[in-house]
């Protein structure tokens, strides 16, 4: 028998919700004529569960509609119509022809008018404003005299301002009582947890159902059964972040920052009070009980003036304060501010970035002293922002310049990049005559900030402030300025001199400039080489704050050069380097690079994960370059999965010129992908216009693969046999440009065109070539596409073991396949080759696809011979694996 306690998923049962269920019963009564019931509550208090229960109990048709994944205008209306009338052409026409809120309200009413249906809308506060207004108009329309409509059950966050709908009822979810909390625990765990554990969890969760569920899930079986002691805080920061994290992420950025100031001030006040009680001898064993824990976990109120002063000192806007109080997130009374929900305050502390803790915690100390000491230690990424303007004006120009430099570095690392641009530009002006080297750094960093923000005018402003520069810096400023104003005849010689002098540079900061110059010239090989030298120097000099930026530049250079595996490895290292020095902006760029690499390999979940992480930082901080890369990755993944129309719609803003378009340096690089998606989805006119502009850009020689990609675009747009000529030109021009993935995509497009022209024999060769290239690059999604096209021509795509294909495997794939053929497990292979088991599994799947086999059982028949190594026979590695396995078995026995 086993006494282990296991956690089961909670069902739709509700506790302590008699009033709410009675309101739902009134709404759904058979004799009723429709209506609206609003259900409000905090995160995790059961709004979604109540909607699910109502939908399950309703005798007629019930529709549940979740908040759409994004808040673009009318996205909620589209989600509603998709749920109410999936696949109905008249519904799609009604949505497409509706004009404004009243028109959409009429369309909604027409779709549901007179139906005895229940529509459950979840998280109304996350719907876009256009759809919310149209829904409110529809609800008012349905409540007009003589009209009978559906029942609407609508959930919203407690702070959301509900629309004014005549006759609508509102219920507010509260916390559970002790009996309800214990009943929920009994449902969550089977068998029930130990009684002391139940008492402690009921006490710590304070009747919050979501907190209770999350705490139980994280504690584990041993602790729930009472076999292991509970942690000091069963409801810790991880639990509260899980429950409140989504709610906090959807708040405006300035509101989140101000909540962090209030929470940190409250924690500081709590620590002071605790220290005071300890010094006065008032702390005794009695405080360790329930009351002591509650006091320790609750943030006290703090003076409003102290919060406002701390916010201004940390550079946090105070304007959202009145709205936070009006929404009920903060309570203001007797000159004090406190959180209405204590769990929310603790969740804010747990989920706030560490850099924000540093900035607010130090808001009261003399800033010139802290800034100077931070600069002396080289900890620019940890230095605080500027204090009040009067204190700044009192500083000497040198100190003011360095203060602006520190502020700019902090914003460049983890804040809005255009704020960084302004601060760094000011620093360059103040330090120009007093510290020329620091002024030069500030100019380059200001240009980098503007570049990341996609602002050409701001880039030029940073370049223009270096009027007294000379030598290599003068060449860099003049060359980059000429390139940004499309005077390439002047830009090329100046930037070429910067690249040519990279061998004389030892400072990684100067090497970054040389690498940037090489990228502007389109010399991706030189850019990768120079940035690799900068990385080596930064490592040798232990430049921990500079290292993430160097890795960011190197990852992008490798990406431009088509070295995707190297780019991914560099980006992952960049993520590891950015975390300890608190540089989320750099991390966002690395996530964007990883998303693009994943779009090459066809790993859709990885594309979505990394692109989402990149956009989560890029959008609020104005990182247009990272956002463009992430959106491009999502579109390439969609195109690889056959969603051409969706990909084209995503790419349209990226190829559009002007401030509302994509990044100015990436716009032309995205065009070939857009042309392919646009042609496949019928947007030929837009594709032709973009290709015309791309032809002008490709002629400038700033991108190696551009001539081949231009020929591919012309082939996709050509009519009749002209397409065959341009496909042939594209394949020819791909030779020597170094990007095998794009060559394979051209071959795939060519083979697909030939197959559709009923030339299966001619189509097989380019499709086989494309398939082999995709398989060697582990581009599984694209390989599947090529495999399906090849199969459609009647060509063989595998299925039987192919010994001749062994030589097409990469050396790493061959080593892994040999180990697997001898019976080694993924874990054993990973330990031997210093890889992760997931990487080994990924390589094995590529091996199976290339060799045309289904499992490792077939590997011994096709695995090539072991290469003889100096001083050992081919079986030594296998013997080592067997020996290590035997040792582990002996140890376990």
Image (tube, rainbow, N blue to C red):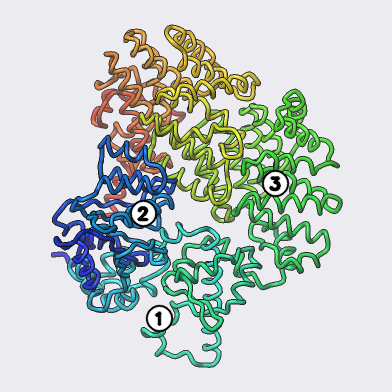
For label 1, the SS is helix
Q: Position of residue 670 (x, y in %)?
A: 53, 30
Q: Position of residue 102 (x, y in %)?
A: 38, 48
- Quarter of the picture holding the N terminus: bottom left
Q: Is residue 409 above or below residue 348?
A: above
Q: Position of residue 400 (x, y in %)?
A: 78, 60
Q: Which residue is mark 1?
A: 294
Viewer can see residue 4: no
Q: Residues within 10 Å of mark 3 (few under 14, many from 20)?
A: many
Q: Is residue 26 above or below residue 627?
A: below
**Residue holding disc 2:** 137
Residue 213, horizontal then vertical, whole percent: 29, 66
| Residue identifier under label 3 | 445
Q: Look at discs 3 and 2 and give the one toward the viewer.
A: 2
Tell me the distance, in whole angstroms, between the alpha carbons under discs 3 and 2. Answer: 50 Å
Name the front one of labels 2 and 1: 2
């Amino acid at each position: 028998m086993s006494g282990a306690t296991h956690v089961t998923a909670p069902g739709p049962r509700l506790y302590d919700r008699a009033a709410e269920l009675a309101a739902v019963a009134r709404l759904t009564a058979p004799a009723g004529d429709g209506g609206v019931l609003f259900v409000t509550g905090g995160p995790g208090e059961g709004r979604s569960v109540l909607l699910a229960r109502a939908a399950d109990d309703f005798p007629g048709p019930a529709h549940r509609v979740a908040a759409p994944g994004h808040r673009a205008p009318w996205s909620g209306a589209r989600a509603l119509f998709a749920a109410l009338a999936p696949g109905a052409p008249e519904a799609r026409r009604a949505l497409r022809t509706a004009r404004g809120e009243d028109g959409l309200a009429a369309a909604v009413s027409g779709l549901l008018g007179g139906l005895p249906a229940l529509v459950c809308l979840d998280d109304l506060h996350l719907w876009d404003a256009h759809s919310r207004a149209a829904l409110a108009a529809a609800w008012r329309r349905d409540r007009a005299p003589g009209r009978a409509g559906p029942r609407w059950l609508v959930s919203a966050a407690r702070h959301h301002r509900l629309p004014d709908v005549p006759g609508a009822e509102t219920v507010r979810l509260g916390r559970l009582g002790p009996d309800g909390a214990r009943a929920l625990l009994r449902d969550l765990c089977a068998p029930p947890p130990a009684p002391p554990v139940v008492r402690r969890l009921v006490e710590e969760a304070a009747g919050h159902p979501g907190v209770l569920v999350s705490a139980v899930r994280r504690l584990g079986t041993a602790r729930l059964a009472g076999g292991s002691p509970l942690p000091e805080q069963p409801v810790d920061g991880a639990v509260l972040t899980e429950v409140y994290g989504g709610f906090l992420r959807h708040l405006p950025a300035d509101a989140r920052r101000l909540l962090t100031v209030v929470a940190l001030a409250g924690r500081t006040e709590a620590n002071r009070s605790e220290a005071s009680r300890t010094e006065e001898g008032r702390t005794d064993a009695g405080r360790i009980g329930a009351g002591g824990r509650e006091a320790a976990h609750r943030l006290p109120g703090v003076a409003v003036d102290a919060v406002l002063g701390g916010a201004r000192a940390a550079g946090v806007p105070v304007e959202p304060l009145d709205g936070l109080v009006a929404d009920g997130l903060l309570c203001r009374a007797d000159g004090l501010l406190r959180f209405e929900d204590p769990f929310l305050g603790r969740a804010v502390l747990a989920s706030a970035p560490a850099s924000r803790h540093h900035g607010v915690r130090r808001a009261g100390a003399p800033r010139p002293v802290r800034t100077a000491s931070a600069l002396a230690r080289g900890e620019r990424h940890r230095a605080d922002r500027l204090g009040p303007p009067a204190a700044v004006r009192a500083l000497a120009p040198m100190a003011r310049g360095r203060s602006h430099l520190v502020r700019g570095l902090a914003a460049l690392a983890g804040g809005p990049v255009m704020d960084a641009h302004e601060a760094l530009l000011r620093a360059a002006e103040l330090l120009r005559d007093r510290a020329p080297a620091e002024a030069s750094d500030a100019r380059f960093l200001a240009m980098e900030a503007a570049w990341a923000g996609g602002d050409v005018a701001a880039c030029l402003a940073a370049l223009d402030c270096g009027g007294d520069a000379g030598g290599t810096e003068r060449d860099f400023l003049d060359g980059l300025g000429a390139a940004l104003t499309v005077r390439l005849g002047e830009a090329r010689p100046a930037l070429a001199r910067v690249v040519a002098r990279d061998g004389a540079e030892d400072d990684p900061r100067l090497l970054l400039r040389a690498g940037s110059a090489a990228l502007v010239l389109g010399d991706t090989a030189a850019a990768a080489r120079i940035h690799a030298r900068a990385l080596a120097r930064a490592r040798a000099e232990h430049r921990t704050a500079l290292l993430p930026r160097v890795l960011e530049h190197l990852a992008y250079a490798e990406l431009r050069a088509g070295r995707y595996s190297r780019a991914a490895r560099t980006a992952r290292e960049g993520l590891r380097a950015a975390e300890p020095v608190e540089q989320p902006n750099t991390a966002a760029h690395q996530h964007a690079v990883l998303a693009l690499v994943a779009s090459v390999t066809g790993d859709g979940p990885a594309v979505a994960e990394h692109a989402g992480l990149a956009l989560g930082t890029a959008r609020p901080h104005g990182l247009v370059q990272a956002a463009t890369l992430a959106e491009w990755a999502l579109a390439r993944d969609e195109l690889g999965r056959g969603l051409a129309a969706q990909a084209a719609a995503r790419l349209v803003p990226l190829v559009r010129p002007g401030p509302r378009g994509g990044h100015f340096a990436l716009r032309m690089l995205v065009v070939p992908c857009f042309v392919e998606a646009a042609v496949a989805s019928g947007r030929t006119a837009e594709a032709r216009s973009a290709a015309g502009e791309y032809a002008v850009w490709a002629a400038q020689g700033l991108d190696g693969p551009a001539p081949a990609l231009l020929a591919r675009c012309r082939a996709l747009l050509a009519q009749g046999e002209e397409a065959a000529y341009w496909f042939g030109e594209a394949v020819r021009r791909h030779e020597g440009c170094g990007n095998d993935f794009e060559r394979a995509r051209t071959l795939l497009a060519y083979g697909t065109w030939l197959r559709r022209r009923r030339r299966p024999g001619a189509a097989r060769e380019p499709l086989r070539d494309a398939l082999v290239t995709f398989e060697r690059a582990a581009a599984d999604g694209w390989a599947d596409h090529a495999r399906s096209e090849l199969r459609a021509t009647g060509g063989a795509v595998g299925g039987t073991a192919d010994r001749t294909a062994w030589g097409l495997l990469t050396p790493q794939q061959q080593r892994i396949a040999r180990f697997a053929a001898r019976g080694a497990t993924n874990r054993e292979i990973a330990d031997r080759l210093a890889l992760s088991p997931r990487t080994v599994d990924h390589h094995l799947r590529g091996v199976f696809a290339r060799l045309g086999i289904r499992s490792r059982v077939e590997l011994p028949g096709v695995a090539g011979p072991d290469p003889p190594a100096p001083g050992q026979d081919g079986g030594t590695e296998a013997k080592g694996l067997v020996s290590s396995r035997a040792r582990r078995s002996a140890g376990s026995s």
